[in-house]
Image (cartoon, coloured by chain):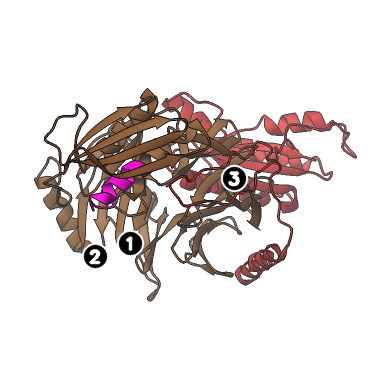
Amino acid sequence: MRKLIIFLFFIMFLFAKEVVITKYIENKPKISITFSGPKPVEKILKMDFKVLDHFKVDYNNTNNSDMKFDISYKNKTLDVKYLKNNKVILEKKYKSSTYAYFPFLVHQAVYDINKYFKMPSAKFLTRKVVYSLLVAPKQSNIYLADYTLSYKKLLISGGLNIFPKWADKNQKVIYFTKLQRLPVLYSYNIYTGKLKKLLSTQGLLIVSDVNKNGDILLTLAPNGSPDVYLLKGKNLIKITSYSGIDVNGKFWGDKIAFVSDRYGSPYVFFKDLKTGIVSRVLYHGKNQVGMDTYGNKMVVSSRESDNAFSTNTFNLFLVNKEDDTLKRLTFKGQNMFPNFSVDGNSIMFIKRENFFSKIGIIRLEENKIFYYRLPKILQSFDW
Amino acid sequence: MKKRFLLGVVGSLLILAGCSKQPTLENANEQNATTSQTQQVTSSNIETGSVNTENTNVQTQTLQNTNVSVRDFAKQVSSIVVYFDFDKYNIRKDQWPKVEKLAELIKSNPSNYTIRIEGNTDEWGTEEYNYALGLKRANSVKKALIDLGVDPKKLTVISYGELNPVCTAHAKWCWRLNRRDNFTYLP
C-alpha cells in the first residue's frame, strides 16, 4: 500500500493543474428565486446556494427554470413557497425566537430544497460549528456558530477553555478542556447549559475524536509524555507508548491514526489494533501536523517547503485507504486544520494569509473550494 | 505505574459518574432541544463561568530562615525565561546557565512553595500538537532541575501551548520569543 501511495503521488506531480476529485453534477436543476426581506438574510441565502453548487440559480425571475421559490423573511420567520407552473405546491415556515438565529433558518431552508430535488447530501449546511478563540493571553472562549460563522454565541468563558468537540451526532453536547491547576475535561449541553466535570489528570487532557458509538480518543500525559488513549465506556485503553509526542488520535476505519514526532518532526502514523503495528501513512513533506479522518478517508496538512516560515508552506492531501489513492486538494498557501463534515463530502479548513485567516470549504464531489474571511484566528473548531 | 494511573482515572470517572448533583451554570435556561425546522438555541447566560485568578495575586510573606522576601523571590523566578528552537523541546546549550541559576535559586530557598513551569509555543502547528510540545518543554526543564538537585515536590508543570503569547506580531523574531518556558512562584 505504501509503495502504491508513493507511486500515485509522483504520478500526480507529472500531471500538474487541478486533480478532478470525483464526478461532477452535470445536469444541475434550474431554479428561480425571488426574495424579500433584509439584505443580510439574502446574503446568506445566496452564499448557501453558491457553496452548495447543486443548482443553476436565477435571481432575476426568468421563465426557463424547472421550479420557482418565493422566499421572504419577516418577524423572525422565513417563509418558503415552492411553485410549479406559478402554483404553490408546498409552503414551509421556519421560525426562531431571535433575529440573530436567521442563518440557521436559511441553511435549513436550502437544505430542504436540496433534499426535495433528491440531490447529494447537504448536511454540512445545517451543522453547528463550535470553536475556541484566544481573546487575551490565557483567556480563551468557546463559541457556537453556523458554518459561515455569521451567527456567533458565547458558550464558555473565564480562563482557558480549549479543544471543543461535539460529543453526539445531534450536536447537543460538547466536550472541552478547561485549563486550571490541572486540566479538567467537561461536557456541556448547549441547550440546557448543564456542565458536567468528567475527568482531571496531570499534564494534558484533550478529546481528539468521538465515534458514532460514543467512544472517545483522548490525548493524556500522566507521566509527562503525551500518548493517545481510547475511552470505551468506562475502560481506558492506552493506544500508543512513546517517550516523545503522540497526539491527535482519530478513528480511521478499523485503525487509529495519530500525529507523532517519533521521526524527529511531526508526521501522521496509524496503529493497526489487530497486529499492534505502527506505520507511517504518507511519505511526503517536512512535517504533517494537521489531520482528520472520515471512514476510510484521511485529509492531511503537509508542509512542503524547507523553510518552516515561508509563504508556500502547507497543502492538503486526501488519502483513501479503501482504494489506495492520494489526491492533492490545495496547491499554494498555508492550508491547515482540515476537518471533515459530518457526511464526509466536505472539508472545512483554515487558510492563513499574512495577517489574515480564511475559512475554506472543499466540496469534494463538486471539486470546488470556497473561501470566506475570518475575523480572528481560530484556535480549534469542530463541525 | 501505568496500571495505577489507569485505575486512578477510571476510578475518578466512576466517582464523577456517580455524583447525583452535577455543576450547572447559573442562569442557564432549561429548554429541551427541538429537531423541527424551528430549532433554536437557548439564550442561556453562560458568562457566569468561573474565572481563575489565582495566579494574579502574589502574596507577600517572609520565607523562613532566609532574608529574601517572597515578593523578591517570585520576581527573581519569573525573570528567568528559557527559550527553545522551532519544534524542539531539548534545552539549548545557551539556555543551560538560566536553568542552573533557577536550580540554585530554588535550592537556596527551602520553604514550602511550588514553582510552576509553564511551557509555551509559537503559533505554528495545530493547537493540540502545540499543547503537547509546550508540556514537553516544561518537562525538559523539570527533569534538568531535578538532575541539578531540586526537590521534585517543589515542581509542577503546565502547558499553555500557543495560548499565552508574549508577542503577537506575525514575524520570526516574535515567534522566537513565544517558544519559551516561564516560571511562576505558587505559595
Q: Label for residue A322?
A: 2
Cα–Cα span, label 1 and label 2: 9 Å
Residue A74 location (% of width, % of height): 43, 29
Q: Which portion, as a residue range, is magenta?
A: A109-121
Q: Which chain is brown?
A: A
Of marks 2 and 3, the one in the foreground: 2
Amino acid at pointer 1: Gly
- Residue at image position (35%, 56%) is A293
Q: Is residue A185 left or right of residue A347?
A: right
Note whether A59 is above or below A188 in the view shown: above
Q: Label for residue B138?
A: 3
Amino acid at pointer 2: Glu
Q: Is residue A117 magenta?
A: yes
Quick one: A79 or A121, which is closer to the camera? A79
Query: Do callouts 1 and 2 mark residues in contact (Cβ within 8 Å)?
Result: yes
Pointer 1: what residue?
A295
Residue A78 location (% of width, % of height): 40, 36
- Quick one: label 3, few (<14), some, or many (20+) residues within 10 Å? many
Residue at the far left in the pictured view: A15
- For numbered disc 1, what is the local secondary structure? loop
Q: Is residue A6 magenta?
A: no
Q: Is residue A97 left or right of residue A249?
A: right
Q: Is residue A90 left or right of residue B33?
A: left
Cα–Cα span, label 2 and label 3: 41 Å
Amino acid at pointer 3: Ala
- Residue at image position (14%, 49%) is A12
Chain designation of label 3: B
Chain B, which colour? Answer: red
